[in-house]
Image: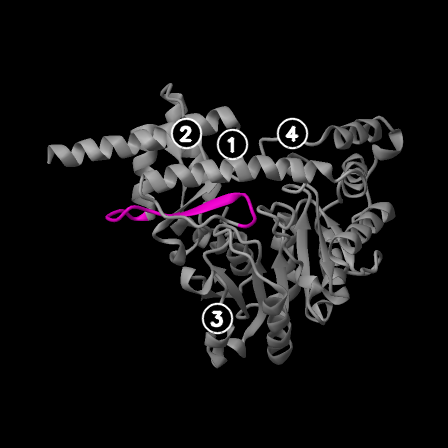
């Protein structure tokens, strides 16, 4: 038996390795406080759970679902985009429910990339953009995201010889891991750039509903002509704390949506219908929970920023998203600093280099940590600083 050579170059997924290290510490009886994975600790709202339970008891929902999703769900997604972004979508041709946005992000490479094609990928970025590209034989070209450019890519800096081979442009705002945001002027420029170079734009937008200080993120599809050149991935995971239910959507360009639907019909059997009915309730029901959750996340963000400043780590207050992107202290790499925190005080953060070479020098902290653990974790971070100060004094 021989495993495909493509597996030789497939690196372990970032969070798998982090979870292994956490498990090792716990196996030794040590308590670990994790600021790592962006998995909301706040429960799914009760009205959504009630709808899920009702639907699960209906025998009609015990069968194989349709890959394209319930017509009612596609309409609920289209209606939500109209209310939220004033974007009109054809529920039958421009909307495709997904088993979580990650599934669609991985599968869309099969629709757009052939062997030797290039995908323009931000650096740092969510690892799946690169992994999916490489698994189908494509090549990633990394677009640096730097603090000096507010973590927006310099599209004009991409070499012409790269653009001739490029098929896909990946974007993600509000951004993971940096917390950066983009405005409509930027997205309008992206549409023009995509038309000029015959690119398909894939915008990953699961954090548009997690925003602070009165800021309201925009959708790529609000840009003039966006549906002519691309699609947007979204998810109920972060908006409604439904990570465990695995449901999201792709919306936009009819050709890409149609191709992605064909791939899905051959590779999966759709979203369980009870979960689809829960999603309909989430999208069409009361949206009060979003503001309530965001108030919690904003308070946590501010507490983390206060402690980071005290221990000498610089970080911008993110306008949106579930993360704080912080510079590591001088003398450390991102991996060294993350390892030191884990070993010295039992606190887990994600080294920025895990998101790409341009993430070096930073760590990411998630806001999805229960308040009691948050306070304990921040106390430990302060203790790390105190310990380092004592060591300096001894020297």
Which residue lies under the disc numbered 4?
A: 43
Mark found first going from the N terminus, 1 or 2: 1
Query: Would residue 229 be found to the left or right of residue 14 on screen?
Result: right
Task: Name the foreground residue: 322 vs 68.
Answer: 322
Percent of width and height locating residue 259: 73, 62
Residue 97 versus residue 228 in the image, above or below: above
Q: Main secondary structure of the magenta part?
A: loop
Q: Quadrant of residue 392?
A: top left
10 Å neighbourhood of mark 4: few (<14), some, or many (≥20)?
Answer: few
Rendered residue at 29%/43% (across/down): 336
Q: Which range of residues does the magenta coloring cover?
A: 319-333
* Nearer the observer, 73 or 8: 73
Work out whether residue 225 can be spotted.
yes
Pointer 1: residues within 10 angstroms few (<14), some, or many (20+)?
Answer: many
Asked if residue 362 is among those painted magenta in the image, a careful observer would answer: no
Q: Residue at x 41, y 63 (%)?
A: 148
At mark 1, the secondary structure is loop
Q: Position of residue 227 (x, y in %)?
A: 73, 67
Contact check, label 4 and label 3, Cβ < 8 Å: no
> Element at badge 4?
loop
- Separation of marks 3 and 2 at Cα, in angstroms: 37 Å
| Quadrant in the picture for residue 365 | top left
Kindly identify which residue carries mark 2.
377
Q: Which mark is residue 154?
A: 3
320 vs 55, left or right, is left
Distance Cα–Cα, label 2 vs label 4: 21 Å
N-term mark: 3 or 2 = 3
Q: Is residue 323 magenta?
A: yes
* Cβ atoms at labels 1 and 2 below 8 Å apart: yes
Which tag, 2 or 4, sits closer to the chain's start? 4
Q: Gap in Å between the C-alphas at discs 1 and 2?
A: 9 Å
Compared with 236, 255 (above or below) is below
């Amino acid at each position: 038996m021989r495993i495909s050579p493509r597996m030789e170059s497939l690196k372990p997924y970032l969070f798998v390795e982090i979870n292994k290290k956490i498990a090792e510490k716990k196996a030794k009886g040590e308590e670990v406080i994790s600021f790592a994975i962006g998995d909301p600790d706040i429960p799914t709202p009760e009205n959504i759970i009630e709808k899920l339970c009702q639907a699960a008891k209906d025998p009609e929902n015990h069968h194989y679902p349709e890959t394209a999703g319930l017509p009612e769900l596609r309409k609920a997604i289209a209606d939500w985009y109209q209310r939220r972004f004033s974007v009109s979508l054809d529920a039958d041709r421009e909307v495709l429910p997904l088993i979580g946005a990650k599934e669609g992000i991985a599968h869309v490479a099969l629709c757009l990339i052939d062997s030797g094609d290039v995908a323009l990928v931000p650096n740092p970025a969510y690892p799946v953009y690169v992994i999916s590209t490489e698994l189908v034989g494509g090549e990633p070209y990394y677009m640096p995201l730097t603090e000096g450019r507010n973590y927006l890519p310099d599209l004009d800096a991409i070499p012409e010889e790269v653009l001739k081979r490029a098929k896909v442009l990946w974007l993600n705002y509000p951004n993971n891991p940096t917390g950066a945001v983009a405005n409509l002027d930027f997205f309008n420029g992206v549409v023009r750039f995509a038309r000029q170079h015959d690119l398909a734009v894939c915008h990953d937008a699961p954090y548009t509903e997690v925003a602070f200080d009165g800021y309201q993120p925009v959708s790529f599809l609000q840009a003039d002509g966006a549906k002519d050149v691309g699609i947007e991935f979204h998810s109920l995971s972060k908006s409604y704390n439904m990570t465990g239910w695995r449901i999201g959507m792709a919306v936009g360009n009819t050709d890409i949506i149609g191709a992605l639907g064909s791939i899905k019909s051959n590779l999966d059997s759709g979203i369980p219908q009870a979960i689809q009915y829960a999603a309909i309730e989430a999208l069409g029901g009361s949206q009060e929970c979003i503001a309530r959750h965001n108030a919690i996340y904003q308070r946590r963000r501010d507490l983390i920023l206060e402690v980071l400043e005290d221990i000498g780590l610089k970080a911008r207050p993110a306008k949106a998203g579930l993360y704080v992107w912080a510079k590591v202290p001088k003398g450390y790499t991102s991996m060294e600093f993350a390892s030191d925190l884990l070993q010295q005080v039992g606190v887990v953060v994600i080294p920025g280099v895990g998101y790409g070479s341009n993430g070096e020098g930073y760590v990411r902290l998630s806001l999805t940590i229960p308040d009691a653990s948050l306070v304990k974790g921040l106390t430990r971070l302060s203790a790390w600083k105190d310990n380092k100060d004592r060591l300096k004094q001894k020297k």
